[in-house]
Structure formats: structure tokens, C-alpha cells
Amino acid sequence: MTFNPLIFRNNRDGIGAPGDDVAANATDPNTLVSLAKKMVSLLSGTIAVAIPAGAATAANQTTQTASLNSIDGHVDGLETLVAATNTALAAATPAGSNLIGRIVSDASAATGGISSTARLASAAASTNATNVKITAGRIYQASGRNNASYDVFLVLYDSATNPPVPGTTTIRKKMVVPAGQAFVYDWPVGLTFATGIGYAFTKLVADADTTALVAADITAFNLDYV
């Protein structure tokens, strides 16, 4: 006969039935019902030891106190872990401008926001080379308008040279400013400058270009930095 786990046979195999006896142990063959009854029996005995029934006697109180102390010991351990975790977090994130994993932009209330803006109302007939900061900093935005009928180029310098010298001072970044258009360049987390911040405008794309603008080619230029 093919084995059928749904058929109860002699309290030894299969799922079993409600009338099965409690299993004597966990090693001999038993039905699932017998084993389940054994588990309930063991749990009931454990609970009975931890919380004995009967009158509030000294013996019962001693047993209950021991059980509760054991639970309290685990709770104390958790409290110690929580306290240590809080201490570690407090050390890692002290009050002030510290950030967790740089989760906000540097130009934020936590660091005072964007503190400075260099302005050029209207470009002169030159490269308009200007140094805005002689120490390390960050640029967050460059904006303005190119009134010329040709592209010009915004050049940024990581240098304390005052002013930067187009064609000589090392370029940090050079960007096209399209003809006849307003422009905005954004760096949400800041474009870092290690030594200083300078800018200039040239008419041609080559890094070594020193060709001056025509007056008023660029107007309303703003450079936001810290």
C-alpha cells in the first residue's frame, strides 16, 4: 500500500488524530499531533515553574522573583546597549554644523548658506579678469546674459593670482556662453576651489585664448560663492 501521510497508523506516522497520546520523546517515530502535544506540555511546565500557581508563599515568591530577575537582566542588557548606541550617535553627530554623510548640500542653513556674490553689471572691452577670493572656496552658481551675436566663454580659475591672467593662469573650468542668451550654471553641492576663485571672459574657445570682449557683451553677471 502506498504511504498516505493523512492516515493515522498506530501513533507512529502521518499527521495523526486528536486522540493521539502525548509523545514520550522527540526521537521515536510519532505523529505530528503527538509531537505538538509534547511541545505544549513542555511549554506549560516551563511557565508553571516560572510563575507557580497557588498562594503567595515565600517559596512561590522566590521562584517568581528569580524568573523576573532573569527577565530584568535581559532588559538591563538592552538598556545598556541603547545607552551605548546613543552615546556613539551623540559623538558622531554633535550639535552644530556637522552633517551625517553629507546628506544636504553644502550651501545650506547648516553651513550658513551662500555667503558672497561677485557681480559684473556690464563687461568692459577686455577679458574682465577678476579675482573674487584668495583662499579656498566653492562656487554654486554663475549666471548672466550674453548680448553678443557670437558665443563667448566663461573661464574659472583655481588661483589666488589677482587678477588671473588669461592664457597663463591654469584654468579650472571653461564654459561656453551661447550667443544672445541668458545663461545659468549650477553646482548644487559646490564646485570646489583649493587655492582661490577667479574668473574671466574670452571670445575664443582655446585655453590659451586672450581675446577681449566687446564692451557690454556680457551683462548682469553674478557669481555665487563661499
Image (cartoon, helix red, strand yellow):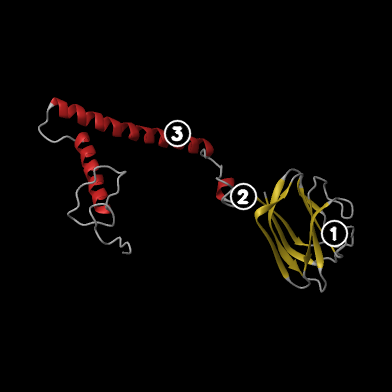
Foreground residue among 27 and 76: 27
> How far from the left and from the top, in percent, is residue 194?
75, 45
* Between discs 1 and 2, the one toward the N terminus: 2
- In this figure, which residue is indicated by the disc labeled 2? 106
- In this figure, which residue is indicated by the disc labeled 3? 84
| Residue 52 horizontal side relative to residue 85, left or right | left
Quadrant where the N terminus lies?
bottom left
Question: Which amino acid lies under the numbered mark 2 shown in the image of this protein?
Answer: Asp
Foreground residue among 54 and 101: 54
Observer-side mark, 1 or 3, equals: 3
Helix, strand or loop status at disc 2: loop
Question: Which amino acid lies under the numbered mark 1 shown in the image of this protein?
Answer: Thr
> How far from the left and from the top, in percent, is residue 219?
75, 65
> How far from the left and from the top, in percent, is residue 209?
89, 60
Please tell me whether residue 76 is drawn above or below residue 134 in the rendered image: above
Q: Quadrant of residue 55?
A: top left
Residue sitting farthest toward the left: 55
- In this figure, which residue is indicated by the disc labeled 1? 127
> Disc 2 vs disc 3: Cβ atoms closer than 8 Å?
no
Question: Which amino acid lies under the numbered mark 3 shown in the image of this protein?
Answer: Ala
Observer-side mark, 1 or 2, equals: 2
* Between discs 2 and 3, the one toward the N terminus: 3
Label number found at residue 208: none
Please tell me whether residue 1 is drawn above or below residue 110 in the rendered image: below
